[in-house]
Image (tube, rainbow, N blue to C red):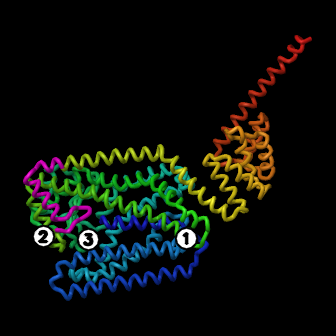
Amino acid sequence: MYSNILHFIIVLLIYTGYQPESANFTRDVDAAGIALLGILFYLYVRNRFEYFARRCASDSNRLSACASYHTALVNQSTALAIIIYALFIYVFDFKLLLAQAPLIQVSTLLANLLGIAPFLALLLIIWLCAFPTYRQFCNTGMQASTYLLSQLKINATVLLPWLLVSLVIDSINLVFADFSKVLEQFPLAGLLLFALLLAVLAIYLPFVIVRLWGCKPLPAGPVRERLERFCAGARLTYADIVLWNLFEGRLINAGVIGFIKKFRYILISPSLMQILDEDELEAVVAHEIGHVQHHHMLYYTLIIMGFAVFAYEALEFMTYKLLSLNILTTMIASGAAYTNSAVSMLLTILPVVCFVLYYRFCFGYFSRNFERQADAHALQMTKSSSGLIRSLEKIARAGSQDRNAHNWHHFGIAERIRFLESCDRDPSLIGRHNAKVGRMVAFYAVLFIGAGTVFYTFGERPLVQAKMTFMQYVMEKKVASNPENTLYVFSLGNVYYEQGDLKKAEACFNKALALNPDDPEILNNLAWLYATAQDKELYRPNEALELSQRAADLAPKPHILDTLGESYFINGKYEEAVRALELAIAARPENLPYYEKQFIKFKKYREEAKKKKQQFDELEPDSHAQAI
């Protein structure tokens, strides 16, 4: 399950991170390329599993290790499937092919389902090729349909939260048409909404999962009665103890899912019950109780969500820093074919690599220590490590696992056994390990809150600066290669203005104006610069008014009328400023509160000017009489 989560998150990052370039789209060629690559993938995977079957069949001494080799081969094929899927996206423009499907633009759920479909098809190829050797070396007698359905159910569990969130977004969009735009304007609100949806799903999803997996209640009898008494003694509340029936119950595993009593389930596979005696089974359940009572499921959820917190500003900042490298800005500025695809691929690699490292090392570190804490909890509950140690040995033998192999998320069997034996000899190790886990969680919580506070409070300025630097480098290269291109020169001036380099901005605006004297946007931006500059050398009210009047005559848009109003205002023409803003507001601009604020400011000064004039007019006759 851990690997499945990693695989699908990588695929989702690839799919959502790519922005297709329609200029290079060739539908028939791309569709043929996807089909051909899929066929080649099938032939390669089939050949690998057939070769694997021949090797295992020819050496009877290696049969005990074939199950482990089979799992490794499936994982290797899945890694290759991710690479093939990336080629579908980056080379063969699958997203552009997908965009032609009906309703794809209006349904997030449909877009996500179809977007992930090619990867699911590649997984289906792997499972079809893997099944003969799986039945031969791992589970004799299973039908292909059962094997495929079990694989689909496991992977559907990973995808289900993502698809349900997509369904919720579709439902909200049906009620609130501008919901997506609001999320784009307030990304933090979107992140909080996503976290809320995940929290709701985390509570109710176990109820769905046990039914999706076809789990049935553990039949009444001595075993159930003993486990119920054991759980009651541990004060563990749950909805049910169920049989984990995937792969015809041959899965050798146990687990617990659910945050609250009503939707918490203890899962035990029938195969595990067959190989363990009651003491050993009780020890395994004690391990699962340890996960619940130490709140590991909550911590797992927070740690996975923590990546979004750490990556929200940091990854975007790193992205623009990467884009600002000379080789990339040169590539982007050149506008060469497939530039967009190449840049998207590079930018997808960054979050994928960051997530893999985070998941493998940060999540893996916590997971290993949580498992060790659950092992120690089982020892304390059963008063001895013998039951859990025997169960681990039996599970390793039954599953043809190498007990000395390392495991990135659970510790290896041998490592777990050595720790339990050490705890038997020195029970204080349990307390020390619990204290270690407590320090880990506390440190992560402080880091989580601290990073979130820093990113959302102070992270915007460096991010904006990184964006501006990237745009500056690109536009400077575009202007250098196309010095007569008005749009490039004007855009570079806007970048300089946003960075606060007003003299360079003025030079670019004047150059653009020389190239196109009647462009209202250039006239407007230069007028705004002269009207609002703090530098006395650049503060030129008369020129601002002249330029803004020309711009308004050419295109009386709200933002241009706002500049005209500001120009009138700094020249003391408050009545004209008010009229300009009245016209701007009448056009119902998007940022209406800003225009209303400007209108109130201008109106206030107009009224004050009228009042002063009236006072002056009233005093003027008296002054004249005194002079006589």
Relative to 207, 503 lies left or right: right
What residue did someone put label 3 on? Answer: 246
What residue did someone put label 2 on? Answer: 275
Q: Of the residues shown, which amino acid type is indicated by label 1?
A: Ala
Query: Does label 3 or label 2 sit earlier along the sequence?
Result: 3
Question: Residue 603: percent from the left, percent from the top?
Answer: 73, 33
Residue drawn at the location 29% of the way across and 77% of the way down: 73
Asked if the magenta segment contains residue 68, the reply would be no
* C-alpha span from label 2 to label 1: 52 Å
Q: How crowded is mark 2: few (under 14 residues within 10 Å), some or many (20 or more)?
A: some
Magenta span covers which residues?
A: 404-432
Quadrant housing the N terminus: bottom left
Query: Does label 2 or label 1 sit earlier along the sequence?
Result: 1
Dominant secondary-structure state across the stretch colored magenta: helix
Q: How crowded is mark 1: few (under 14 residues within 10 Å), some or many (20 or more)?
A: few
Residue 12, placed above or below residue 531: below
Residue drawn at the location 72% of the way across and 52% of the way down: 509
Query: Does label 1 or label 3 sit earlier along the sequence?
Result: 1
Question: Residue 535: percent from the left, percent from the top?
Answer: 68, 39
Residue 43, placed above or below residue 267: below
Question: Is 143 in front, or is 384?
Answer: 384
Element carrying mark 2: helix
* C-alpha span from label 3 to label 2: 17 Å
Q: Of the residues shown, which amino acid type is indicated by label 3?
A: Leu
Question: Residue 248: percent from the left, percent from the top?
Answer: 23, 74
Q: Where, by quadrant of the figure, is residue 28 drawn?
A: bottom right
- In the rendered image, is residue 578 in sight? no
What residue did someone put label 1 on? Answer: 99
